[in-house]
């Protein structure tokens, strides 16, 4: 690669193109990450995609053996993840290349990972949290903007990057709103050093989800993405299928009351999350009229089921054309 096509992210992870195949709950798997590394990018998987520690270990061993580049693991850092300690120990044991933290305080994760020379990137949605996290010295911030799939932020990519720039000197990876090569260049020109991209990879040959889920990503558009609080209690983006329209996107009065009540709040949130994740899993891997499919607005640019290699090629067309431009 020519020196003038290098960004902070390609330097940090030693990858050809500045893209992370984002860790998607239920969707991301080893096959997708392996193919991502073969295509010149990197990929990450949520540790929560694996039900047991043994299953998690087996997958990490396979990734270490078969990946042709770096791979990462996403860890939920708050108290809702009762398996965090063991998941982190397994990541350290297998020396994953990097960890992406979401929610909670990532201090311990950063400290322990850096002891093993494992990079850490932290999800942030605003400059307040971004400033706090920056003081812990991770290797970069992942700016989750309002166009991200799943649990999106509230700010546009440009505004979020600018706000984070005002409080941090760390590399910033933009997450959300990239479905084609021109949008990728747009985010880089806004000041991002790389992109975390998820939704365009749902409808790929390597993705493990049902053909109905993949077809929905092709059939629906950005206008069909809505926010719901019924899955986890927090706003989450889903495709506005007839079932979602029928059941609504807001919690019932009872659910909302329980989630605000000091006495029942924690239990209510756990039950909401458990119920929501079960419905997501059922819809993702089976044919059901109860279709709750998580995705972001970038499915606007998904037109057919393609191999991951081809999706990457399409995303980096403009980046390669501008290889003589310093980014």
Image (cartoon, rainbow, N blue to C red):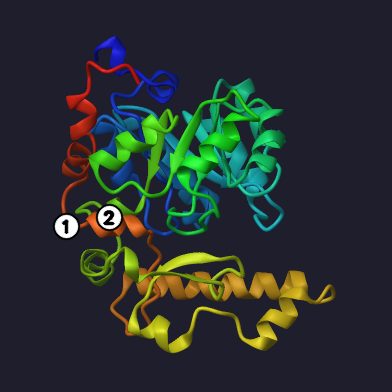
Where is the C terminus found, in terms of image quarters? top left
Q: Residues within 10 Å of mark 1 (few under 14, many from 20)?
A: many
Q: Locate residue 187 relative to residue 141 in the image: left or right.
A: left
Secondary structure of the residue carrying tag 2 is loop
Q: Nearer the viewer, mark 2 or mark 1?
A: 1
Where is the N terminus found, in terms of image quarters? top left
Placement of 209 over or under 159, stated as above or below: below
Please name the residue shown 64% across and 52% down the image.
83
Placement of 35 over or under 119, stated as above or below: below
Placement of 4 over or under 88, stated as above or below: above
Answer whether residue 203 is visible to the viewer in this image. Answer: no
Pointer 1 residue: 305
Pointer 2 residue: 207
Please name the residue shown 43% across and 21% down the image.
8
Q: Which of 85 and 255 is in front in this view?
A: 255
Residue 165, image x, y percentages: 57, 30
Residues at marks 2 and 1, CA–CA distance in whole angstroms: 10 Å
């Amino acid at each position: 690669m020519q020196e003038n096509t290098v960004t902070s992210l390609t330097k940090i992870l030693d990858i050809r193109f500045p893209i992370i195949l984002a860790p998607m709950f239920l969707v991301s798997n080893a096959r997708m990450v392996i193919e991502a590394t073969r295509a010149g990018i990197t990929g990450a998987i949520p540790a929560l995609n694996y039900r047991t520690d043994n299953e998690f270990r087996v997958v990490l061993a396979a990734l270490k053996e078969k990946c042709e580049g770096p791979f990462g693991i996403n860890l939920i850092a708050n108290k809702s993840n009762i398996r965090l300690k063991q998941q982190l120990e397994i990541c350290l044991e297998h020396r994953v290349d990097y960890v992406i933290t979401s929610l909670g305080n990532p201090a311990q994760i950063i400290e322990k990972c850096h002891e093993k020379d494992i990079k850490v990137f932290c999800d942030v949605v605003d400059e307040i949290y971004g400033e706090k996290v920056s003081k812990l010295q991770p290797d970069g911030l992942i700016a989750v903007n309002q166009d991200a799939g799943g649990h999106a932020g509230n700010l546009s990519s440009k505004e979020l990057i600018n706000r984070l720039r005002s409080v941090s000197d760390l590399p910033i990876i933009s997450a959300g709103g990239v479905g084609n090569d021109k949008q990728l260049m747009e985010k880089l020109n806004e000041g991002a050093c790389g992109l975390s991209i998820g939704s365009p990879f749902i409808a790929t040959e390597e993705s493990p989800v049902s053909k109905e889920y993949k077809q929905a990503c092709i059939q629906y558009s950005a206008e069909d993405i809505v926010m719901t609080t019924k899955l986890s209690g927090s706003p989450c983006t889903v495709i506005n299928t007839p079932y979602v329209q029928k059941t609504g996107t807001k919690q019932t009065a009872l659910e909302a009351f329980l989630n605000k009540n000091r006495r029942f709040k924690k239990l209510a949130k756990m039950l909401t999350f458990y119920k929501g994740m079960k419905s997501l899993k059922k819809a993702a891997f089976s044919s059901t009229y109860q279709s709750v499919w998580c995705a972001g607005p970038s499915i606007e640019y998904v037109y057919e089921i393609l191999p991951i290699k081809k999706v990457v090629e399409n995303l980096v067309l403009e980046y390669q054309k501008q290889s003589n431009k310093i980014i």
